[in-house]
Image (tube, rainbow, N blue to C red):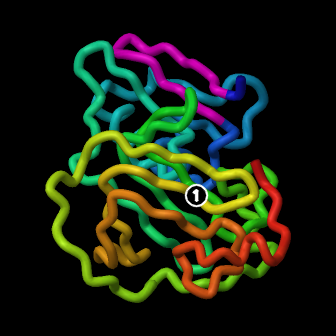
Amino acid sequence: MTEEKHQSKDGTLYYDVKKCIHSRGCVLKRPDVFVPNVKGEWIHPEAADDGELQALAENCPSGAIRYESNNKATRKPLVNTLHVRENGPYSLNADIQYTDDSGQRLTLCRCGESKNKPYCDGSHATAKFRSTGEPAMVESEALDSRDGPLKLEPTPNGPLHLNGNLEICAGTGHTVNRVTDTYLCRCGHSSNKPYCDGTHAKIGFKST
């Protein structure tokens, strides 16, 4: 278990180092809550109020930070989205269903080099992974519903299977496709990124 639990008077703040991509938004925005470069306890939710802790969690791109308020239910995304980051990972914001690791945000490896699959661990930078964050737009119909549960299944030695309502977006934000069931490349070698084209089998990609 990698998730830390920190109580405040208004709720519970969770931090999961397994998911963290060290974007440092937390220590830059609220260095009084996430105190950098100290020995011992470095997370202090008592320094922020209920709304501020909720905002910190919602702004964490990887889902490493989450917050459960005693005063109100956590808001689920109104639109399930997956952003394709330039030369980097997938950023997923949805009502994610993944084993016991359900949540609303995950940053998922698409370069094939992460040592912490299916999560990104920053290996795309050292591997010099190159892939556009502006994939070609696919003509697609508006979804009947844009929210709801989204099932994530990393297939053995294969792609990421996503089942549920989802808008695939460029890194700059605009929607490039709308799907209810799709397979996304995570070996880093598809010729049709972000979608799987079967190349994982040819290169002997291995991952559970």
Q: Main secondary structure of the magenta part?
A: strand
- Hey, what amino acid is under mark 1? Leu
Is residue 56 in view?
A: no
Where does the image place residue 72, in percent across and percent down from the top left?
A: 23, 20
Where does the image place residue 52, in percent across and percent down from the top left?
A: 33, 35
- Describe the element under mark 1 as helix, strand or loop: strand
Where does the image place residue 14, in percent across and percent down from the top left?
A: 53, 26
Quadrant of the rendering where the N terminus is positioned: top right
Q: Residues within 10 Å of mark 1 (few under 14, many from 20)?
A: many
Residues drawn in magenta: 3-16
Viewer-proximal residue, 54 or 105?
105
Drawn side of residue 55 relative to residue 183, left or right:
left
Residue 122: quarter of image: bottom right
Total numbered circles: 1
At 65% from the left and 30% from the top, the residue drawn is 42
Is residue 42 in view?
A: yes
At 44% from the left and 85% from the top, the residue drawn is 134
Q: Is residue 89 above or below residue 194?
A: above
Q: Is residue 146 above or below residue 85?
A: above
Q: Is residue 86 above or below residue 184?
A: below
Viewer-proximal residue, 123 or 27?
123
At 73% from the left and 42% from the top, the residue drawn is 37
At 24% from the left and 15% from the top, the residue drawn is 71
The residue that mark 1 highlights is 160
Where does the image place residue 46, in percent across and percent down from the top left?
A: 45, 20
